[in-house]
């Protein structure tokens, strides 16, 4: 039985989601503040977290950062649940490591469907550990370990940078439009992420290219988008 941790200061929200998730076969834990959530995470290591963005003693972004920086917890999927609807909030949530984002009001059955979808993706990442590493030139990417190496040096990447590299290395020489690359890497179609893609590419080039001004790996296809391919 998979365990879902719900973190929300509204006891009614926790109660309502608990009913639908338990009816769907999940074990459910409830926390009403950030401190309790971190205790549950360290002790129980749930399979997925549904996390409210605004909590009385902290916010969901800080908790997400803490989870993603803890080796034992970093691969736990996180779905953010919030009343905020601004795209910039969604972008920040995804950039710090959230796997999905649901705004209130919501249909509890949709939440259950999203939970199942995110868990399936997470299981796919675990199964990928037995698959061969992805290699291109001096780059080697290990999908489930979320590691990228340039030669024998590990490259320190943010979550979004890693997912972009993963998408590019799964389809070398393929020309991605900006929207296609974002959707392939993150399964999201927010325009704000598309607008920020150029910044992520610029940062990636600084980390993997001998000369970011004349890149060897991530090529710009003017008027279209990007591809992984040698000059």
Image: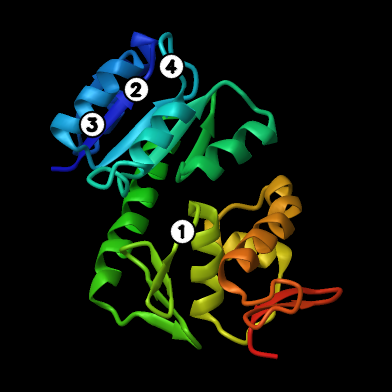
The number of numbered badges drawn on the structure is: 4
For disc 4, the neighbor class at 10 Å (few under 14, some 14 to 19, many from 20) is few
Drawn side of residue 199 relative to residue 117, left or right:
right
Drawn side of residue 198 relative to residue 3, left or right:
right
Residue 119: x percent and y percent? 32, 50
Q: Nearer the viewer, mark 3 or mark 2?
A: 3
Q: Residue furthest right?
A: 223
Location of the N terminus by quadrant is top left
Closer to the N terminus: mark 3 or mark 2?
2
Report the disc number at residue 7.
Answer: 2
What residue is pinned by disc 1? Answer: 156
Residue 166 visible somewhere in the drawing: yes
- For the point 39% across and 28% down, the residue is 63
- For the point 43% across and 16% down, the residue is 58
Element at badge 4?
loop
Query: Colour scheme in the image?
Result: rainbow
């Amino acid at each position: 039985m998979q365990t879902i941790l719900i973190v929300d200061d509204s006891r009614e929200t926790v109660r309502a989601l608990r009913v639908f998730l338990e009816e769907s076969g999940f074990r459910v834990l409830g926390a009403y503040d950030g401190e309790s959530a971190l205790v549950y995470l360290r002790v129980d290591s749930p399979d997925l977290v549904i996390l409210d963005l605004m909590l009385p003693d902290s916010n969901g972004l800080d908790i997400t950062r803490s989870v993603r920086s803890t080796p034992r917890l970093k691969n736990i999927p996180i779905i953010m649940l919030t009343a905020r609807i601004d795209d910039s909030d969604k972008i920040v949530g995804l950039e710090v490591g959230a796997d999905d984002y649901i705004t209130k009001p919501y249909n509890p059955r949709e939440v259950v469907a999203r939970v199942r979808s995110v868990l399936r993706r997470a299981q796919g990442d675990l199964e990928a550990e037995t698959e061969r590493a992805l290699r291109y030139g001096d780059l080697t990417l290990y999908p489930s370990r979320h590691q990228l190496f340039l030669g024998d040096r590990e490259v320190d990447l943010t979550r979004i940078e890693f997912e972009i590299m993963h998408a590019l290395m799964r389809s070398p020489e393929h020309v991605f439009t900006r929207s296609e690359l974002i959707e392939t890497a993150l399964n999201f179609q927010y325009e704000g992420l598309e607008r920020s893609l150029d910044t992520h590419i610029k940062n990636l080039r600084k980390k993997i290219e001998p000369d970011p001004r004349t890149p060897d790996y991530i090529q710009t296809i003017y008027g279209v988008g990007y591809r992984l391919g040698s000059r």
